[in-house]
Image (cartoon, rainbow, N blue to C red):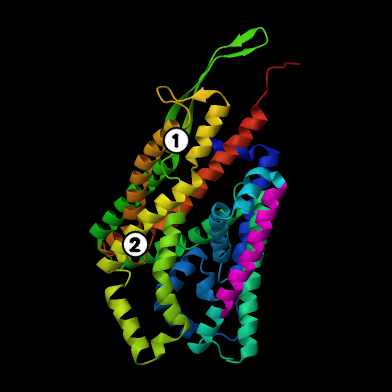
Amino acid sequence: MLNTLRNALLVPEIRKRVGFVFFAFAVFVFMIHVQLPNVDQAKWQSVIASGAFYQFLGFLSGGALQKLSIIAMGITPYINASIIMQLMTVVIPQLEEMAKKGGEEGRKTISRYTRWLTIVLALVQGFSMSIAMSRSGVFYDDSWLFIAYAAVSFVAGTIFLMWLGEQITDKGIGNGISLIIFVGIVLRFPSQIGQTFSLASKGSVNYLGLLLWVAIALITIVSIVFMYQGQRRIPVQQARRVVGRKMFAGRSSYIPLRLNNAGVISIIFAISILLLPQQALSWFGAGGRTGWAATVATDMQLYFGPTSFLYNLVYFLLVVIFTFFYSSIVVNTKDIADNLKKSGSFIPGIRPGDPTVQYINKILFRITTAAAVYLGLLAVLPSLQRDTGITQLYIGSTSLLIVVGVALDSITQIEARLAMRDYRGFIKK
């Protein structure tokens, strides 16, 4: 990997793209410090500490939510809009036709729909957060005019991040939205590592627990790399063809099926559903009320808190279910079988058509089962991490998947650009 980065920096075009990515990162860091006015920071910090949803968003936003800057919502509305559009592409035939046969124009249309849906979701989330903050006493100005001003500021920050991500994709290397999430997570690491070592120097941290935490983190990272890079290769044989007077011999290839087809989407789905009830209670100010609302909030914290057994069990099951669901959307086995049949290819020992679909489905079910169980265990891993006593340095499953996955994808794209530049072809001058 280090050789790849060194070779990339020697190429002017790739060096320019890498420089643009780091410039965009600097803009993102600057926007974190553009704070919303009329905010009681002490009250806001107490509100964040009492809500798991805010802590999750704050970790992905690089500290923008903790500072309550105009990009406090981060890129979350765009992620949700992209997931919804992917699901709607499967449900609505017109969108499916547009995605498959519309070409570049179809992709642009779907991207435009995604942007508009992002604005709608950002408006809903921005006004909900602003009203909840006003009821919690975070704003010095409780007027509806300032609430609307805060909501519009949050929406504008999300739209700016969406535009910045698209610029990174066009002029940089890698997926811009993923890189923004990546840098938002990485920005939190130095302060937390420094806090952990500071406590260790004072004797407030158990060194055995620290070593156990490091071992868990290393094993997790290695397993994530294996799951991202792992493939199940299905052998494919192409039949011999006769073109004019020439006969072309059949050649062998394979169909690469990734072990983890769902990526981080299944965990994002699951944690969004789990944290939605708590977030709804905070929006409606249940924490400061009496009666049934306070009773429900207390019971949820007691029996369904992030450290409870019931919470982790439901979390595990939801991740497994969503992994199977999203893998079935990403991998269309019928299309794979049809393409093999049209190209005159076949899987050795398997008849074309429905037998091929059934064979691929059986293999996909096996690898998806392994990936679903792995992602489910990875999702509940933070509970085991808390048992080590190292609560200052929190590395969640979603964060690790994003960081490792984005890093591997970026390195792959750099290697592809280097291969395109170094390719000489068969013609020599």
Q: Is residue 294 left or right of residue 37?
A: left
Whether residue 260 can be seen here: yes
- Would you place residue 344 above or below residue 266 in this image? above
Badge 1: how crowded within 10 Å, few (<14), some, or many (20+)? Answer: some
- Would you place residue 30 above or below residue 173 in this image? below
Name the kind of residue labelled 2 in the image.
Tyr
Q: Is residue 121 magenta?
A: yes
Residue for badge 2 = 315
Badge 2: how crowded within 10 Å, few (<14), some, or many (20+)? Answer: many
Q: CA distance from mark 1 to mark 2?
A: 31 Å
Q: Find the residue positioned furthest to the right.
A: 429
Residue 415 spot, x, y in % from top left: 57, 36
Q: Considering depth in this image, is 150 or 342 the residue closer to the camera?
A: 342
Region of the chain picked out in magenta, as a range: 105-127
Q: Which residue is pictured at 65% across the width and 62% down the height?
A: 115
Query: Where is the C terminus found, in terms of image quarters?
Result: top right
Secondary structure category for the residue under label 2: helix
Q: Earlier in the sequence, mark 1 or mark 2?
A: 2
Indicate the quadrant where residue 422 lies: top right
Residue for badge 1 = 357
